[in-house]
Image (spheres, rainbow, N blue to C red):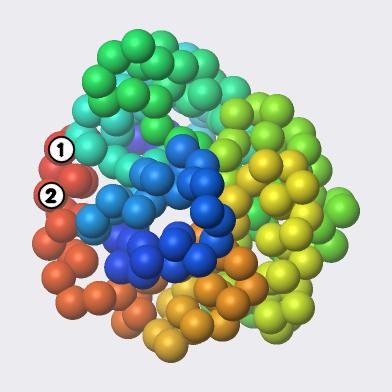
């Protein structure tokens, strides 16, 4: 397979209420009870996926009931084009989120065993380009943020481009700090996940198979 999917639960959707009085499509999607994000990543060691593969995966995620997709920047336009085909049908298009990486604004993930690197300055992340490619939000790992001020700066820069910020964390107890800085949601993984999330994740994974 050339594409991998990872399913996250959103146990802290109430954070959305404090972010804005007028919710964006992404905020509305993530505020659903037990909303599910599907994180899509391409293995750089393998050949790029075909347009058909991307369209099929995009469609299956929507039909399986995902709330939103986390997509690498180089695949944003392809997923945005496929999701747009559902504009007049049910379920409608899924909001797209681009996961930010240390020093760059693209997709991928940290190498195993490497110490987390800080996120680049918001001005170098090309947030406007991500928005133009179809992103409605960006995701950042809490380990890439150097304190609450860094998150607040990212939220400010993202909102200037009509993007919302979602924080991915493996540490419990960060909800209050993230909410105070303006993130619309926290995505938990590992030990930080709520009890019961694995079963729901498995159900969505089976639907995508």
Q: Residue furthest right?
A: 123
Q: Nearer the viewer, residue 7 or 175?
A: 175
Question: In which quadrant is the N terminus drawn?
Answer: top left
Please give the name of the residue rendered at 51% of the width and 42% of the height, measured from the top-left corner: 24
Question: In which quadrant is the C terminus drawn?
Answer: top left
Q: Residue furthest front?
A: 21
Mark identifier at residue 207: 1
Please give the name of the residue rendered at 78% of the width and 55% of the height, measured from the top-left corner: 157
Judge whether residue 107 can be spotted in this image.
Answer: no
Height in image: 38 above or below 18? Answer: above
**Left or right: 85, with 160 as reference point:** left
- The residue where tag 2 is placed is 203
**Residue 126 x, y percent position in the rendering:** 80, 43
Height in image: 194 above or below 77? Answer: below
Please give the name of the residue rendered at 37% of the width and 44% of the height, measured from the top-left corner: 29
**Residue 104 x, y percent position in the rendering:** 75, 52
Please give the name of the residue rendered at 69% of the width and 61% of the height, measured from the top-left corner: 155
Quadrant in the rendering for residue 65:
top left
Judge whether residue 79 can be spotted in this image.
Answer: yes
**Left or right: 40, with 33 as reference point:** right
Crowd around label 2: few <14 · some 14–19 · many ≥20 (10 Å): few
**Residue 49 x, y percent position in the rendering:** 47, 24
**Left or right: 123, with 201 as reference point:** right
Mark identifier at residue 141: none
Are the residues flagged by discs 1 and 2 in contact, CB closer than 8 Å?
Answer: yes
Crowd around label 1: few <14 · some 14–19 · many ≥20 (10 Å): few
**Residue 54 x, y percent position in the rendering:** 42, 23
């Amino acid at each position: 397979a050339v594409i991998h999917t990872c399913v996250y639960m959103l146990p802290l959707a109430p954070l959305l209420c404090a972010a804005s009085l007028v919710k964006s499509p992404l905020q509305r999607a993530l505020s659903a009870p037990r909303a599910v994000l599907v994180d899509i990543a391409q293995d750089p060691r393998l050949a790029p996926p075909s347009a058909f593969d991307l369209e099929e995966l995009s469609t299956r995620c929507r039909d399986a009931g995902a709330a939103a997709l986390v997509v690498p920047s180089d695949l944003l336009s392809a997923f945005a084009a496929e999701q747009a085909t559902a504009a007049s049908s049910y379920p409608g298009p899924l909001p797209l989120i681009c996961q930010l990486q240390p020093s760059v604004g693209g997709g991928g993930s940290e190498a195993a065993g490497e110490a987390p690197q800080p996120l680049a300055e918001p001005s170098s992340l090309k947030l406007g380009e991500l928005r133009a490619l179809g992103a409605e939000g960006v995701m950042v790992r809490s380990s890439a943020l150097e304190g609450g001020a860094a998150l607040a700066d990212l939220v400010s820069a993202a909102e200037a481009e009509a993007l919302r910020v979602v924080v991915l964390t493996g540490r419990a107890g960060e909800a209050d700090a993230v909410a105070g800085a303006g993130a619309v949601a926290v995505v938990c993984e590992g030990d930080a996940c709520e009890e019961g999330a694995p079963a729901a994740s498995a159900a969505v994974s089976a639907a995508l198979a």
